[in-house]
Image: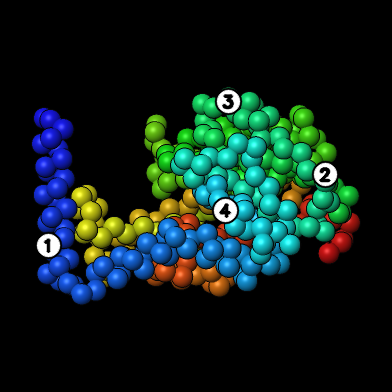
Amino acid sequence: MSIPLQLLAMAIFDAVLLHILNTVAPKTWQPIKWSLCEAFNQNKGSKVISILEQSYADADVIFIQEAAATFVESAKPCLGRRYMILRPYVLDGFRNQNSIILAKRGFFEEGSTIDVTDHIIRLAGGGKWIAPGDLCAMTMQGADGKRYLLASFHGDTNGKASLPVLRALNEAVTTYYPDHVLICGMDANTHKRHSDTTQGFETFNTSFQAIDMLSCWGDAPSLNAHWTTRNARTYLQPQLQKAVGIADVAKKGETNLKDWILFRSNQLESSEEQRDNTGLREFREDMVFPTLNFPSDHAIVSCLCIRVDQIKEGEA
């Protein structure tokens, strides 16, 4: 009815929450809040860097989404020795949601990188689907003699941008970079159910298979076996109908398969796919995340990719 009335209602709601906290946990709720702030905001970047440095040092390519603009500089002292840290030409410093690629030195030749992000954006229909920083696409020479097209992408909330971007990458590698091996790490924001406004994970899977692409989850991914996000809201927020009690987290927590590693079916095959929501290369089915030790609300997804021509030649 009026902005002043809305502000009054918000203030009353905040006062109710503070009253609950001061009644239930008067001496502990503020330290808990500070610990959450430090884990998920102030120290999130350093925790992510530590996990990648300690648990994923053997990875040849790492795709990162929704990174702060400052992450690139923060990562250089530790990760820069092992990886080329590749970022789009335009970083998003306002939303702080940037896609980044870490390409291992030695596996890829330094100085061979070409930024093709703008080209992929044009093929996908321009800025209609892609916000600044959401896509990072690079071509480079591999030490194995092959050229690669690597792409890291963060989809919109409803996942409607994910297929147009994937089709643009497929068009790029089949038309403009036919001698390149395509690998894409994507937070596709795919959901349980498909609708006119929401991209369902099964429809997404069927659609990219129609253009001869595959993912690390095989031909028929299962939500029960491959979910990568689990959210459970507490009662300390306004949408109480979405709140989940701690005893019901495993049953009622919102789970989705949002994260994918994708490639051309005639170029690569994958195995040893793995999810990690601990930072220790382990996955706990009963856990909601982020946690104080794992600051991401998406699981880390990893797999082993082998070139099809190597398989045909009997190489390791």
Q: What residue did someone put label 1 on?
A: 19
Q: Is residue 148 visible?
A: yes
Element under label 2?
loop
Mark found first going from the N terminus, 1 or 3: 1
* Position in image of residue 222 (x %, y %): 49, 55
Mark found first going from the N terminus, 2 or 3: 2
Q: CA distance from mark 3 to mark 4?
A: 26 Å
Q: What residue did someone put label 3 on?
A: 126
Q: Which marked residue is nearer to the observer: mark 1 or mark 3? A: 1
Mark found first going from the N terminus, 1 or 4: 1
Q: Amino acid at mark 3?
A: Gly
Mark found first going from the N terminus, 4 or 2: 4
Residue 112, numbered circle: 2
Please, is residue 281 above or below residue 83 in the view? below
Element under label 4?
helix
* Position in image of residue 305 (x %, y %): 72, 57
Q: Is residue 154 visible?
A: no
Q: Which marked residue is nearer to the observer: mark 2 or mark 3? A: 2
Q: Residue furthest bottom?
A: 27
Q: Nearer the viewer, residue 131 or 167?
A: 131
Q: Residue at x 42, y 39 (%)?
A: 158
Q: Which marked residue is nearer to the observer: mark 3 or mark 4? A: 4
Mark found first going from the N terminus, 2 or 1: 1
Q: Residues within 10 Å of mark 1 (few under 14, many from 20)?
A: few
Q: CA distance from mark 1 to mark 3?
A: 49 Å
Q: Nearer the viewer, residue 170 or 120?
A: 120
Q: Residue at x 24, y 69 (%)?
A: 29
Q: What residue did someone put label 4 on?
A: 71
